[in-house]
Amino acid sequence: MRIKYVDISNKTPLSALNQLVEKARAYDYSTIVLHGLTTVETLGDVRLVPRTTIDYKSNIQAVKSKSLKVFSAKTPEELKLSNQVLSVLNAVEVGGKLLSDSRSRKSYVKLVNVGKPVILNASEIIDLMLSGRDLSGLQTLLSLYEKSQITIALGSGARSLSEVHHPTTYYALLLELGLSEVKALSALAANPASILRGAGF
Amino acid sequence: MDLPEVILVLVASTALALALVAILQLVILKRRIEQVLAGLNSKVLKHVVKSLEKRRKRKNRYLVVRLATSKNVSLNELQKSLDEAFIELYGKKNYSEASPKVLYYSEKTSKAIIRVRSHRKWSVFLVLAYLERRDLLSYVCPERITGTYKKAKKYAETT
């Protein structure tokens, strides 16, 4: 059985859309959630889903479009999840200081209590690894995922075509970070698909 | 008391003394065994298993990868860039442990076979992704992991 992979977070510019679809087809991606898209499209065999990013300053009432609504937070202070925000969003994306700071544990407890799936960007993790930064925040998050206290979906987070990699590479990344094989595969295939289903796609 | 009776008493008392010593030694040995068993907790067992694993011979794995490059590269150039990237990411110690080697590269089918120690196979995929990120490779598609070079080459040449 062929596994259908979903890239839950992709920031490649729309000008390179055709090349992105070509690469996604070659890499066995069935769906890509893309920033900047307005409607759901299907190019070739690849389904493109629009994404709206919400942050703690956003006006929630203005977010009405049919897209995957993701709350993005880079620091513990930005992780303000009010009931109004929770009623709208489909997932929470964490990055920046939340991944590298070991004092983010309190914020992760908040994520566990909220019960929303968490999106991680592989591109950002690789950048942090290459710059030799401490990844203790990420390790805490992954240990919570290993204990099934939260759900994690890994997206490419690619800002250019060269940052889009094969799902096996992301699987290798998660294994290198210490996840078990089952959990790593779920983070790439089952969990992103379930987020999309939850959002009505 | 007759002489035979004296000898009998002496033999009996010696046997009794020997039996007592044997019982005492048995008790001491039992205590020691209990002490050793108490010391064998999960931490010690884990350490023993780890040291046994270290002694075990590492098997090789052969990774069949489809690569595309912006310019034509030879097998030696590919090996050189793989070595440099591996050392940059994981250091020289891990590089010598993994000893990745490009055994086969066909420009025609754009397939390569990379040999690596089994416990480091995922690191090689990350190194290839790193080369893709640096635009040294434009396309990296891991296709199969095999246990023998024969199988890997058969797969690389037929598909």
Image: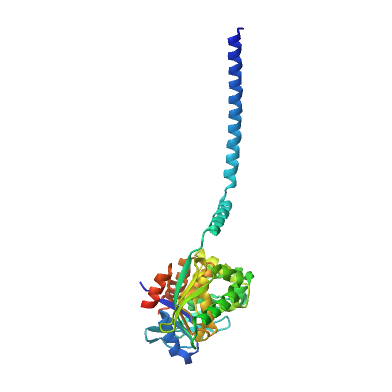
Residue at 44% over, 89% down: A19
User: Where A151 sits versus A201, above or below?
Assistant: above
- The quarter of the picture where the N terminus of chain A appears is bottom left
Q: A185 and B105: which one is in front?
A: B105
Question: Which residue lies most toward the top here?
Answer: B1
Give percent across and percent down for residue B118.
49, 66
Question: A16 left or right of A77?
Answer: left
Query: Residue B133 location in percent, x, y?
Result: 53, 82
Does the rendering let one see residue B136? Answer: yes
Choose between B15 and B37: the one closer to the eye: B15
Q: In the rendering, at what x and y percent does residue A82 appear? A: 55, 75
A201 left or right of A146 in image: left
Q: Where A132 sits versus B119, above or below?
A: below
Q: Residue visible at 63% across and 75% down?
A: A133
Q: Is residue A116 above or below residue B10?
A: below
| Residue A115 in view in this figure | no
Horizontal side, residue A178 vs residue B149: left or right:
right
User: Quadrant of the rendered structure where residue A32 is?
Assistant: bottom left
Q: How many marks?
A: 0
In the figure, residue B20 lies in which quadrant? top right
Placement of the C terminus of chain A among the 4 image quadrants:
bottom left
